[in-house]
């Protein structure tokens, strides 16, 4: 069976109809769906990352005060702190994504965009396989979220997906990267989240 010809280039099903999907359709790359899913998860993860880092900072500051150690507040200013936070956020994101995929097979962003990750027999990935995949994707696909560098890695990943149908971290332990057509409202909702988060990120750079 094949996908209904009425589904457009975004993979959306017409209202009131259930798309007929064969196994081939479930493994199409859907580059933009993957892009939005990843960045939605990345931005959502800023909440726990910031909370954890602030907790660590206040905890360390409290201990320093109790022990009478000098505390240089200038370390919280400038690019060094931003760089440390980026690396810390990438670590937290990788661990949380690993946990979600190993326990549920997807993440909030992937669920929104109709994406699941399974092993060769269709079950959830082990924590080890999920961690391996997420780590590779974070470094090779997102470049730790570093501006400009991540733009280059995204371009390379998109080109590889377009030509080969997969990137190398899709082949970790023979995993299956399953996708399905989604409704237009999901695309709109995902785009709004991404645009708002990007706008907030850019605004923060000028504060």
Image: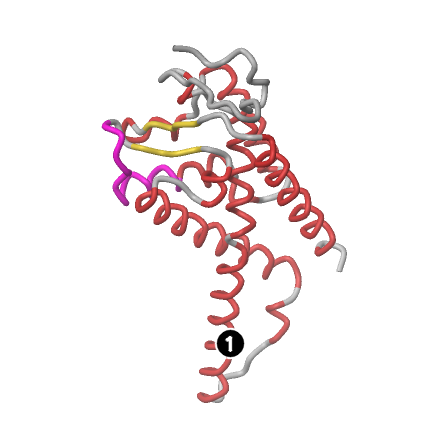
Q: Position of residue 32 (x, y in %)?
A: 57, 28
* Quarter occupied by the C terminus: bottom right
| Secondary element type, mark 1 | helix
Q: Position of residue 143 (x, y in %)?
A: 52, 40
Please report the bounds of the magenta region as a residue range.
121-135
42 in relation to 70, above or below: above
195 displayed left or right of 17? right
33 in relation to 43, above or below: above
128 displayed left or right of 50? left
Q: Position of residue 140 (x, y in %)?
A: 47, 34
Q: Where is residue 16 in the image (x, y as percent from the top left)?
A: 53, 26
**Which residue in the structure is indicated by mark 1?**
58
- Foreground residue, 162 or 62? 162
- Foreground residue, 10 or 46? 10
The residue depicted at 47 percent of the width and 71 percent of the height is 56
128 displayed left or right of 156? left
Chief secondary structure of the magenta portion: helix
Magenta run includes residue 127: yes
């Amino acid at each position: 069976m094949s996908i209904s010809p009425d589904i457009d280039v975004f993979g959306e099903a017409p209202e009131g109809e259930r798309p007929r999907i064969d196994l081939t359709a479930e493994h199409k790359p859907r580059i933009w769906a993957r892009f939005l899913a990843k960045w939605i998860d990345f931005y959502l993860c800023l909440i726990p990352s910031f909370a954890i880092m602030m907790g660590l900072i206040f905890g360390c500051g409290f201990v320093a005060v109790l022990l009478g150690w000098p505390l240089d507040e200038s370390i919280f200013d400038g690019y060094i702190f931003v760089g440390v936070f980026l690396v810390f956020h990438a670590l937290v994101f990788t661990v949380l994504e690993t946990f979600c995929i190993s326990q549920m097979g997807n993440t909030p962003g992937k669920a929104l965009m109709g994406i699941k990750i399974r092993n060769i027999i269709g079950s959830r990935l082990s924590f080890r396989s999920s961690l391996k995949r997420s780590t590779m994707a974070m470094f090779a696909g997102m470049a730790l979220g570093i501006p400009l560098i991540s733009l280059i890695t995204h371009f390379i990943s998109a080109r590889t997906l377009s030509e080969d149908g997969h990137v190398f971290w899709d082949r970790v332990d023979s995993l299956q990267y399953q996708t399905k057509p989604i409704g237009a409202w999901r695309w709109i909702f995902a785009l709004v989240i991404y645009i708002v988060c990007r706008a907030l990120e850019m605004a923060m750079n000028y504060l």
